[in-house]
Amino acid sequence: MRKIQLAVVPGDGVGKEVVPAAIDVLHTVAEVHGGFQFEFTEFPWNSDYYVEHGKMMPDDGINILSAYEGVFLGSIGNAKLVPDRVSTWDFIIKIRREFEQSINLRPAKYFKGLKSPLVNPRDFDLVVVRENSEGEYSQVGGRIYKGEDELAIQNAIFSRKGSERAMRFAFELARKRRNHVTSATKSNGIFHSMPFWDEVFDEVKKDYQDVDTAAYHIDALTAYFVTRPETLDVVVASNLFGDILSDLGGAILGSIGIAPAANINLNGKYPSMFEPVHGSAPDIYGKGIANPIGQIWTAKMMLDQFGFEDAGSLLLDSIGDVIESGFVTPDLGGKASTTEVAEEIARIFKEKA
Ligand code: ATP
Ligand code: MG
């Protein structure tokens, strides 16, 4: 029996509702599977902790988390108590950087029953692999002059290692899916970094002759998300392009409450972190109506990461069944509560197993 030690940070707002719901589902999954067990250790690091201690986590917080095999995070942020920049930079970005989580993985898949703004969302099933450590989000640059001559200079950093790492991850993932990788580029407009990105992509793809590829400029690719999603399987993109594309992917599904994400450490030195796309949703917190699906789908990504892909795909099927049945939370047009939806997903999982 494999025991997997996980650190849990429910965080703020609806994180405190959806994380326990997802953990209950994970216990059911482990019980039914029989080959593994999750052991959760919870940490109360959130905005209330900040008010009390003046920081988002203890000074040795990173050290504490590094003893675990993964971090299961709800959502962090309460603008009334902590400036957003502090909660983001001193917590989420700090963990991503310290734990070298160089890949941000965001799947988006349509399920029957979702109210997508697309006319024909049926074939929408893709994963955005976003480079998570460099690219356009750099602190290199500065501002000079004042007044009407003022200038801001922002440099993007693209390393061969960083680009190649994201691309290889995308190709490996495509082999487990529909064998197709699309690269997001803009080499007709961006002079140095994007031609380099294309060059690295062309080199990497030689090692994956069995995988079909495409490369589109980001403007065209954004349109293809809407007009021909059936041609997309795995999409690999730089930090900024990946950020934009994955939000678009979430929006196409109809509610941010179902979108999952994972920050992956590839070198095995540190834990990966699993967190849904949505925030703490203070407007609905405390009502018991937060959609738990984003957190449960995130749990499915964690199962995949630990090698329990069978259980992961069965869990995703169970989520799909629940969405189709209409037994969902108000954001998806239903009347069910957070715990009711989670319990129903666990029940269907048991039935399918
Ligand atoms: P943050 O700064 O923490 O990212 P935000 O306000 O930018 O917060 P969310 O907290 O994700 O973003 O909220 C955006 C909208 O989506 C809100 O109306 C919220 O109620 C809704 N929402 C977010 N998560 C869920 C969920 N799990 N279930 C239902 N609705 C949700
Ligand atoms: Mg937000």
Image (cartoon, rainbow, N blue to C red):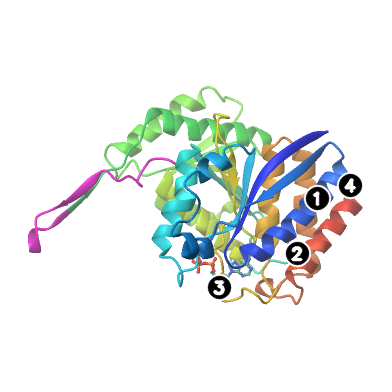
Residue under label 2? 323
Query: Is 138 placed left or right of 106 in the picture?
Result: left
Q: Which residue is mark 4?
A: 353
CB of residue at label 3: within 8 Å of ligand 1?
Answer: yes
The part of the chain drawn in magenta is 129-151
* Quadrant in which residue 253 is drawn: bottom right
- Number of marks drawn: 4
Q: Which residue is mark 1?
A: 27
Camera-nearest label, 1 or 4: 1
- Give the image quarter of residue 67: top right
Q: Residues within 10 Å of mark 1 (few under 14, many from 20)?
A: some
Look at label 3 and name its amino acid.
Answer: Pro
Q: Decide: is 335 above or below 307.
A: below
Q: Quadrant of ligand 1?
A: bottom right
The span from disc 3 to disc 4 (Cα, nearest Å) is 36 Å
Q: Residue at x 43, y 52 (%)?
A: 90
In percent of width and height, residue 274 lies at 61, 48
Question: Which residue occupies the extreme right position in the image?
Answer: 351
- Please give the label number shown on residue 272: none
Mark 2 vs mark 1: in front: 1
Check if mark 2's residue and mark 4's residue have beta carbons within 8 Å: no
